[in-house]
Amino acid sequence: MLKDFFMGLSQNQFLNSAAKKYGLKLGAQSVVAGTNIDEAIKSMKELNAHGISCTVDNLGEFVFKEEEAIAAKENILNVIEAIHENNVDAHISLKPTQLGLDIDYTFCRNNLREIVDKASRYDIFVNFDMEDHGHLPQTFELLDELSLEYDNVGTVIQAYFHDAQEYLEKYKNFRLRIVKGAYKEPAEIAYQDKQEIDANFIKLMEWHLLNGKFTSIATHDHHIINHVKEFVKKNDIPLDKFEFQMLYGFRKDLQLKLASAGYNFCTYVPFGNDWYGYFMRRLAERPQNLNLVAKQVFNKKTNTIIGVAASAFVLGRMTKNAKKKRR
Ligand code: FDA
């Protein structure tokens, strides 16, 4: 119920544009590394100083206009330049819809190609984040096309899909990030039960560690992390074959602990004005993250309280209509 509520909020375009104007609020600053590239670079340098690499996401949502997709492309090109200039240990994560996949496939492919081309010149990897199942075939198609020319590309396998293993085997020679899956998907194609999703995650992760190129194990779940530690030890899997990934601002102690224990660790660093949908999806995923909001409300400014109240009011009305499934 709460999950659907926040998912509904994440799709509210009115609140989304309002949020862009007012900067980071509602506690989002705890999980979004600033609104501009300078702030993101600063955060990444801090993480690098702890031996943590980064994958940086210049947040973007609801892109249905060509000029917005082009602006997103320009921003990502600037991020690549900034990573290079600042000598930061980081790569790019992006969403194909941000670059125009909902507008036109070829238009999106051309935008992506420019990004991948520039990144390849600086030896920077580009991850195509995986969105909902409606965008999945075309995201793999983009990967197929661009990997004919470039080898600095990879993507994500979502463990909630029944056919995830097929994709994993087909793309085993790519650097792959394994996640549980963040979108609300129908039962005909995706496991709904947490135990089934977790079991499939473990199966996929073990298979790719044994047979694949490089595995990014993206989860905050300490049960899975402990399982990975045992599995790699038992199977003599070298530490340079995999990394753990978590989102910026979550389980910071565990992030530092894993990095200092000698595991490769990569933090997903989102930044930008378009933080609202990302933040609401994190609340949908784990309502306990509301603590982040509560801390802001009780410790900081009144305008935050007003922001929370306004959101709750408008969004409360929206829950009824929360039919769309984007997360
Ligand atoms: P999950 O939410 O299942 O929690 C499992 C357990 O872990 C909890 O019960 C709790 O014990 C513990 N736990 C979790 N969070 C905690 C916290 N903050 N503090 C304390 N304990 C906590 N999805 C997608 O569809 N496409 C994508 O491209 C990506 N990309 C991506 C990158 C990275 C780096 C990450 C970490 C995640 C993604 N995701 C994603 C999101 C992913 O699919 C998934 O929705 C979330 O990671 C939540 O699932 P978890 O496995 O993290 O734990």
Image: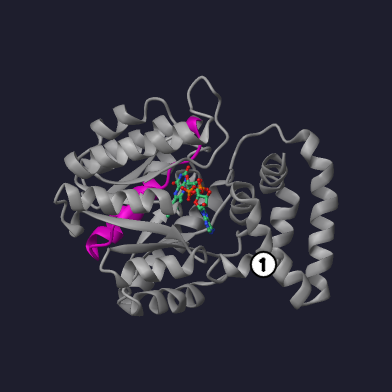
48 above or below 187? below
Q: How many marks?
A: 1
Q: Is residue 202 left or right of residue 193?
A: left
Q: Residue at x 61, y 64 (%)?
A: 273
User: In terms of image quadrants, where is residue 137?
Assistant: top left
Image location (x, y in percent) of residue 70: 49, 53
Image location (x, y in percent) of residue 302: 83, 74
Residue 132 shown in magenta: yes
Q: Is residue 232 left or right of residue 13?
A: left
The residue indicated by pointer 1 is 27
SS type, badge 1: loop
Between residue 269 and residue 286, name the one nearer to us. Answer: 286
User: In terms of image quadrants, where is residue 179?
Assistant: top left
Q: Residue at x 45, y 70 (%)?
A: 253
Q: Quadrant of the N terminus?
A: top right
Which region shows up in magenta? 110-133
Residue 20 visible in rendering = no
Disc 1 residue type (three-letter)? Gly
233 above or below 302? above
Q: Residue at x 59, y 69 (%)?
A: 30
147 above or below 321? below
Question: Crowdedness of circle 1 by 10 Å Cα count: few (<14), some, many (20+)?
Answer: many
User: In terms of image quadrants, where is residue 272?
Assistant: bottom right
Image location (x, y in percent) of residue 133: 48, 31
Whether disc 1's CB lies below 8 Å from ligand 1 is answered no
Residue 41 visible in rendering = yes
Residue projecting furthest to the top? 188
Q: Residue at x 71, y 47 (%)?
A: 9
Q: How is the image coloured?
A: one colour
Q: Quadrant of the C terminus?
A: top right
Residue 221 shown in magenta: no
Q: Is residue 90 left or right of residue 272?
A: left
